[in-house]
Image (spheres, helix red, strand yellow):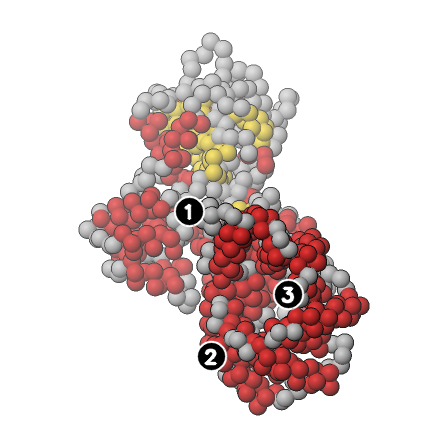
């Protein structure tokens, strides 16, 4: 991202530009710092001391960086040449108007190499009379090279560098009746646009300005070209060429996988290729090195950096983090990036990073004066007594914007579910700076933030999917920390979210692994392990293995009675699940008998109004109906509905489920029309409360269609099921068992309506 006045990219010169106010703004060198704008007034210049010989055109000032080995000709090369051809619209930078183009991108994407390729190509093609290359990390560096250009090209007095710099910028101004000069000024690696106020080259029909920077400030947005990562094909071509130049050959699939591990970042690819050559190891071995959390990125860099590089990618990003942390709101960019370092590089919902746990983390890592708190800083007595000001959600967003300006993240608020994207190697470099204790604490804080952003009812399926993706990344990145001192609840919420979204097979696999991992970390008898076994049994049943689920519940029940006692809530809940899956496996009468026994114990232990007691009543009525007493089931559900509305409200999930069951058993008792009317009313409420994509809403859609068919409207049932099928496939997936049920019913009602089942 770019600061308000930093250009990382190309600026195309064109139009008049005024630097300084009329009447005497000046360049002032004090203590090595350039202060004030350069004044260009009139067409005359003042030189002090003897004139020196002027260099003939064409003339180059400064050194173009050498071309990187195996340089890739990318789409940005063409875009850059098109952008620097002809006049362009003005871009406002600070107090100056500059005609030009901006190339911007994170450190390591190859901005300098693209600029060098453009400058070298234009120079060798004879398109330039004057080429000036400036490493413009600060105002002093830029002014110094301007002064040197004036000495060489204008014969200015080298003793007065201030006047020389001012003279050179004035000379670049287009002048009537003067011989046109085709010039190019490259300002490479601009750190802060504000540093160059008064030092931007003027616009003109024959001049071009090319700027590279990591900043993406609003002031630079005029002709912005973002330099991105290599494509997969470019990455493979680069690695193949770089290794082939040293007679090294690796399988394409390994090089493609290595490029993916490195996020297709050009700088990282070049340093990886050098490491493979220097160390004599394979791409597969290098990938193993990267996958090892004990290995720092710095350890995976070659001893001698290739292509004249002066720093590793991690070192370059560290400087950017320092700069972002100094931007307002000061001291928050670094701790914000630490949280993002544990989440999905492909998109983090903004609500996660502005949640209460995230704000608490930011507050704890910023002192009153805005500087970042460190362990040493916070150990001072005067700091321990100071209560930091709580960070607000707006300040948290400000920290994201600061990181975005330095191209450390991409922040796109309009895409709220994936508002923040971070390159995976930036994430790795940030995690590398943490001590083991900091690493584990940040992982659990990030898990807290995820959990805080997770809605109790997942109405928004895209948000739920994004949260699950972030939970997966967090688990992969810091799984051990999520079991200290106990298994974090986000592990369970993520798995249940999978199942409730219809991905029951994936949910089963999730809890199978969670059971093993929890047992390994905490022991087989730990409550967290028992909870994972409970969920595993549930999703095993939801995949269609009701008998297997019942067997798993029976084994779990024996352990719970042994460890927690017969009246413990977990024991009673497991008895409920065991009865349910026995019923699903075909033992309806046995299930009803088990629920009747359980109800007596629930009343004794928890009382008649406890939610678990009400749930047992619901299950007892359901299995009585399945055992053949449909009218009795309907009467029981009607009685329970009044209690649930009184105790839990009309929109509570248990209330909605009871309405569903009441309508179903009315239909089974012979009142198909009444069932259809009840399902129609329930559907409107479930859409309002749960959303259109919730599995329970889809179930109500199915029940409504089926009831209409039973009430005599076979064509209406077929039409409703035809509409439901693609919706259900999108939400649940083609292989979900309910999809097979919908397809079967659709064929049945098409046949009843006199239509060809496959029509």
Between the C-alphas of marks 3 and 1, the distance is: 67 Å
Vertical arrangement, residue 114 with respect to residue 517, above or below: above
Report whether residue 508 is seen: no
Residue highlighted by disc 3 = 668
How packed is label 2: few (under 14 Cα within 10 Å), some, or many (20 or more)?
few
- Mark found first going from the N terminus, 3 or 2: 2
Which residue has dot 1 on it?
Answer: 108
Between circles 3 and 2, the one closer to the viewer is: 3
The tag earlier along the polypeptide, 3 or 1, is: 1
Mark 2 or mark 1: whose residue is earlier in sequence: 1
How far across and down, in percent of the image, does residue 438 sit?
54, 67
Q: Badge 1: how crowded within 10 Å, few (<14), some, or many (20+)?
A: many
* Left or right side of 385 for 335: left
Q: In the rendered image, which residue does mark 2 sit on?
A: 520
Depicted 582 relative to depicted 187: above or below: below
Q: Is residue 730 left or right of residue 287?
A: right
**SS for dot 1:** loop
What residue lies at 19% left-to-right and 51% top-to-bottom? Answer: 247
Point out residue 344 in the picture as x, y percentages from the top left corner: 50, 56
């Amino acid at each position: 991202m770019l600061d308000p006045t930093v250009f990382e990219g190309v600026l195309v010169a064109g139009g008049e530009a005024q630097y300084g106010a009329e009447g005497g703004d000046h360049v002032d060198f004090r203590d090595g710092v350039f202060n004030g704008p350069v004044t260009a007034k009139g067409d005359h210049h003042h030189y002090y001391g003897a004139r020196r010989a002027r260099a003939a055109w064409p003339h180059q000032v400064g050194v173009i960086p050498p071309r990187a080995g195996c340089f890739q000709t990318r789409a940005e090369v063409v875009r850059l040449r098109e952008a620097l051809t002809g006049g362009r619209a003005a871009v406002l930078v600070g107090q100056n108007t500059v005609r030009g183009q901006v190339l911007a991108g994170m450190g390591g994407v190859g901005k300098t190499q693209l600029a060098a390729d453009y400058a070298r190509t234009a120079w060798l093609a004879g398109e330039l009379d004057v080429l000036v290359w400036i490493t413009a990390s600060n105002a002093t560096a830029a002014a110094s090279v301007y002064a040197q250009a004036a000495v060489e090209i204008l014969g200015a007095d080298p003793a007065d560098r201030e006047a020389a710099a001012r003279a050179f910028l004035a000379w670049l101004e287009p002048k009537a009746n003067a011989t046109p000069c085709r010039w190019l000024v490259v300002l490479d690696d601009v750190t802060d646009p504000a540093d160059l106020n008064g030092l931007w080259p003027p616009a003109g029909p024959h001049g071009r300005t090319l700027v590279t920077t990591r900043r993406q400030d609003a002031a630079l947005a005029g002709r912005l070209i973002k330099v991105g990562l290599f494509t997969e094909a470019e990455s493979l071509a680069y690695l193949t060429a770089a290794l082939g130049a040293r007679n090294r050959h690796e399988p394409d699939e390994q090089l493609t996988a290595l490029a993916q591990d490195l996020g297709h970042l050009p700088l990282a690819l070049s340093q990886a290729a050098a490491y493979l050559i220097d160390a004599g190891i394979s791409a597969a071995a290098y990938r193993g090195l990267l996958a090892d959390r004990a290995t720092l990125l710095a350890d995976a860099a070659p001893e001698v950096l290739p292509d004249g590089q002066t720093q590793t990618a991690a070192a370059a990003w560290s400087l950017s983090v320092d700069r972002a942390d100094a931007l307002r709101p000061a001291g928050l960019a670094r701790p914000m990036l630490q949280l993002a370092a544990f989440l999905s590089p492909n998109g983090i919902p903004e609500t996660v990073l502005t949640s209460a746990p995230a704000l608490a983390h930011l507050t704890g890592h910023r002192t009153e004066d805005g500087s970042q708190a460190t362990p040493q800083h916070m150990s001072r007595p005067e700091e321990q007594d100071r209560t930091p000001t709580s960070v607000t959600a707006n300040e948290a967003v400000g920290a994201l914007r600061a990181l975005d300006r330095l191209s450390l993240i991409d922040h796109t608020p309009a895409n709220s579910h994936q508002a923040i994207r971070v390159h995976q190697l930036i994430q790795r470099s940030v995690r590398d700076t943490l001590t083991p204790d900091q690493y584990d604490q940040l992982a659990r804080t990030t898990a807290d933030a995820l959990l805080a952003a997770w809605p109790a009812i997942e109405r928004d399926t895209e948000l739920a999917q994004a949260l699950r993706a972030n939970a997966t990344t967090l688990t992969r990145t810091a799984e051990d920390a999520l079991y200290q001192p106990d298994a974090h609840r986000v592990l369970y919420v993520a798995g249940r979210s999978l199942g409730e979204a219809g991905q029951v097979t994936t949910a089963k696999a999730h809890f199978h692994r969670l059971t093993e991992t929890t047992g390994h970390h905490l022991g087989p008898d730990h409550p967290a392990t028992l909870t994972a076994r409970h969920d595993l049994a549930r999703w095993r049943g939801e995949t269609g293995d009701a008998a297997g689920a019942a067997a798993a519940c029976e084994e779990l029940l024996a352990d719970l009675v042994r460890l927690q006692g017969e009246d413990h809530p977990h024991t009673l809940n497991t008895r409920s699940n065991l009865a349910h899956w026995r019923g699903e496996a075909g033992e309806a009468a046995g299930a009803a008998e088990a629920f009747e026994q359980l109800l007596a114990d629930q009343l004794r232990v928890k009382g008649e109004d406890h939610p678990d007691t009400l749930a047992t009543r619901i299950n007892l009525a359901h299995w009585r109906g399945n055992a053949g007493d449909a009218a009795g089931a309907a009467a029981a559900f009607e009685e329970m509905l009044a209690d649930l509305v009184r105790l839990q409200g009309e929109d509570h999930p248990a209330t909605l489920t009871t309405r569903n069951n009441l309508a179903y058993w009315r239909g089974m008792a012979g009142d198909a029309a009444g069932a259809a009317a009840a399902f129609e009313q329930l559907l409107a409420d479930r859409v309002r409360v749960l959303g259109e994509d919730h599995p329970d809403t889809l179930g109500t859609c199915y029940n409504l269609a089926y009831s209409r068919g039973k009430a005599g409207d076979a064509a209406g049932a077929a039409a409703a099921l035809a509409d439901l099928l693609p919706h259900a496939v999108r939400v649940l997936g083609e292989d979900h068992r309910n999809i097979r049920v919908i397809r079967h019913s659709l064929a049945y009602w098409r046949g009843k309506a006199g239509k060809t089942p496959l029509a």
